[in-house]
Image (tube, rainbow, N blue to C red):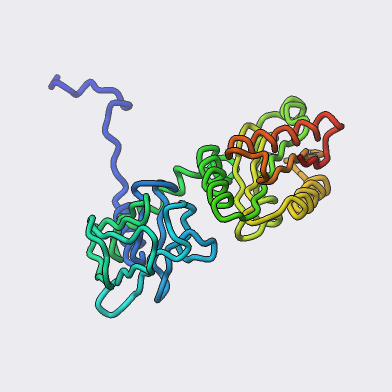
Amino acid sequence: MPMGDDKSETDKTAVAESDTLKIRLEEAKSAPPLLVVISGRPLGKNFYINKEKMVLGRDLAADISIGETSISRRHTEFAVTADGILCRDLGSTNGTFINDEKVEASKKLEDGDLIRCGNTILKFLREGQIENVHYGKMYEQASTDDLTGALNKKAISDLIKEEYARSTSKGLSFSLLMLDIDHFKKINDTYGHPAGDYVLKATSTLIRDKMTRGQDAVGRYGGEEFALVLRETPLRIAVDIAERIRMAIEKNVYQFEDKTITVTMSVGVASVDSTCASSDDLIATADKALYDAKNQGRNRVCAR
């Protein structure tokens, strides 16, 4: 018998699906120019240049908003022209650099150019490339919790740090909610782990899609614990948002197969103030408020 003929089925090379590359190439045809963060935070995040003019800056209202203190509120402008994408510094404090050369006037971007704004470096990719699709999917996969669709712990933790730095440097309000599903172990024990997974996913979807504003961000912080970032939001409004979420969870109908599951949530609320020396302090304060809610009987909102 010739060598190799006795290989088992599991040793054989799988046949690649011939349509995979075709599908990716078709997606790439419609992919606009792209900026990818390759150094700094949020690492790996991509920004499509899909408007005639887009401003990169620290301001929340910027088209490309990056919460880095070394970036000016309005730092760099990217303009789509008949000749290509032009990059222009907007009088920023730390300047805009392309391939380590300071931009003194508008400069056309070439594929693969590296743009440095403050401590953040972005890579430019021209339109219609398969890399554009790849980077988009790669960042989404790297920052998303597989089960719930919310940001994963690393992504939400990085965002809390960024927003804390932004709020303290500019004197803006910033609140954090820590939310925990009550008696989650009992749900798993009573209805099974698939039912528990369903409750986690349904809760995340309800908060993310119906209970938050465009500027907010929700992430899965632990097993059954979520964190909600409320940008430019004072404590009073944050408590109102927390209470609306708590009530929505309590009233929501959780139907798994033929079983109706009762779900409630405890919420801790904290805001940046003079007692917060770091983002870790803010998280710790929100956690203490969450423990207060648990110790006071659950299914309630407490603030510190």
- Residue 212: where, in percent of width, then height? 67, 56
Q: Residue at x 62, y 48 (%)?
A: 229
- Residue 65: where, in percent of width, then height? 48, 59
Q: Is residue 166 visible?
A: yes
Q: Which residue occupies the extreme bottom position in the image?
A: 82
For the N terminus, the quadrant is top left
For the C terminus, the quadrant is top right
Task: State the residue in front, 87 or 2.
Answer: 87
Q: Residue at x 30, y 37 (%)?
A: 14
- Against 81, is 95 above or below? above
Taking the image as shown, residue 56 lies to the left or right of residue 291, namely: left
Q: Is residue 198 visible?
A: no
- Residue 259: where, in percent of width, then height? 79, 38
Quadrant of the image occupied by residue 182: top right
Task: State the residue in front, 192 or 95.
Answer: 95
Q: Residue at x 64, y 51 (%)?
A: 174
Taking the image as shown, residue 263 lies to the left or right of residue 105, namely: right
